[in-house]
Image (cartoon, helix red, strand yellow):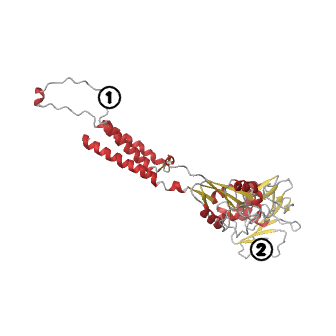
Amino acid sequence: MELLQPFMLWGASAVAIPVILHFWHQKKGKTLDWAAMRWLQEKDQQQQRGFQFDNPWLLALRCLLLVLLAVLLSQPVFRWLRPSPAVQKIHLVQPEKIVVDNFRFELEEATRRGEAVYWIDGSTELVKKTDGWPDQPLFSPALLQSVINRLQKENTELNLYLVNDSRLANAPFIRVPDTYQLHLVPDSVSQPLRNYLAFSDGKKTFVNLSNRLITGQDLDPAARFLSAPIHTDSLTVLVRFNDKIEQQTVSAALDALSEVYSLDIQQEQRENPAKKYDWILTDTDVVTPKPETFYVISGTPKVQTVSNVIYVGETFSPQRTERVRNGQLPEWLGELLIAYFRMKPEKTELSPEQLKTVFVATARPDRQQPEADRNWVLIALVVVTGVERWVALKKNA
């Protein structure tokens, strides 16, 4: 027996109530002498000790009533009352060459065992051979959901063969049966190459497949990177603000960014015209920006016209800027740096945590409608109630 609401079974502890009431009514009352008692023959009575059950069958019926009520509220499902249906395995395959080539053995074995294999498209024909695949319409989570809804039945074990890319997260979630398996292949062919930074100490800074900024000796082997870094050696940064508070705020934010992500950042506060700077943060507008330098200019609400100059309409001070008050300035500067060096590609893979959010398992249909099983418990409850009332009236208890 399976309980869909097992916490309601705690109500069975209420059987203690009729037991307590039973012994409470057995308490001996106060003896009152009356005149005719002296004409009655005295009887030797044996003194009884301890508790004795009065009308034990009635007490058992009342306890059984409470137990049946608790079981009914727990929504039981009696699996042994019906034969267990066979589990039907369904394989849904995204018609992509990289998917078919990677899982060809699994799909051929499923076909040999007579299991259902379908392409994720508008057709409903079984796949007999995986040598070729149909012309796929534009893949989307809506298409995948419609195919799942069309093929999902009772006791279905679903196997999904998909390319792991960001298109899966275009929908809030995808409903799948509670027994499902994901077979994912990274889109290493069409995945764009990633940029990375290399420093003089041998460390490299890059964005991994989980979209996290990482600094280490080796690149992520699961991702694809360019053969050469987009920048080498340390990042030379000029921090030049007329406001001292703003100067200190930005400098502290860069120190925090360097410490958290192990970035090799060399700060300077006085400009050297003969020196090349990788990043300049200032509150003074630049007339002729250098193409190899990244500019972040505060307090100047102007429209961005070139890719390496960003105008911020607010100043970097705790009194005027919300992100500075909340301590988000280092993270925001890091995002600007990642965007400038194009270290985060547009098309990325989903992490295991993101996949758990996208694919939502739902209960089997037979678990959602246990009406027949509850009806049997309800009938038993009605019968026991009738017997209990008949015994109670007969014994006047």
Crowding at mark 1 (Cα within 10 Å: few <14, some 14-19, many 20+): few
Foreground pick, 159 / 201: 159
Foreground pick, 264 / 229: 229
Indicate the quadrant where residue 269 lies: bottom right
Q: Is residue 280 left or right of residue 166?
A: right
In the image, residue 10 above or below residue 146: above
Q: Is residue 369 left or right of residue 231?
A: left
Specify whether residue 330 is in view: no
Residue 122 position in % (x across, y down)? 66, 68
Q: Amino acid at mark 1?
A: Gly
Q: Secondary structure at mark 2?
A: loop
Residue 281 position in % (x across, y down)? 77, 66
Q: Which mark is residue 285?
A: 2
Q: Amino acid at mark 2?
A: Asp
Q: Secondary structure at mark 1?
A: loop
In the image, residue 168 above or below residue 76: below
Crowding at mark 2 (Cα within 10 Å: few <14, some 14-19, many 20+): some
Foreground pick, 170 / 388: 388
Q: Quadrant of the C terminus?
A: top left
Dot 1 corresponds to which residue? 50
Q: Which mark is residue 145?
A: none
Indicate the quadrant where residue 364 lies: bottom right
Mark 1 near mark 2, Cβ–Cβ under 8 Å?
no
Q: Earlier in the sequence, mark 1 or mark 2?
A: 1
Name the mark nearer the viewer: 1 or 2: 1
Residue 32 position in % (x across, y down)? 17, 32
Q: Residue at x 84, y 56 (%)?
A: 199
Q: Residue at x 80, y 68 (%)?
A: 294
Indicate the quadrant where residue 340 lies: bottom right
Q: How many marks?
A: 2
Question: Label 1 to label 2, Cα distance in Å?
Answer: 98 Å
Residue 46 position in % (x across, y down)? 25, 24
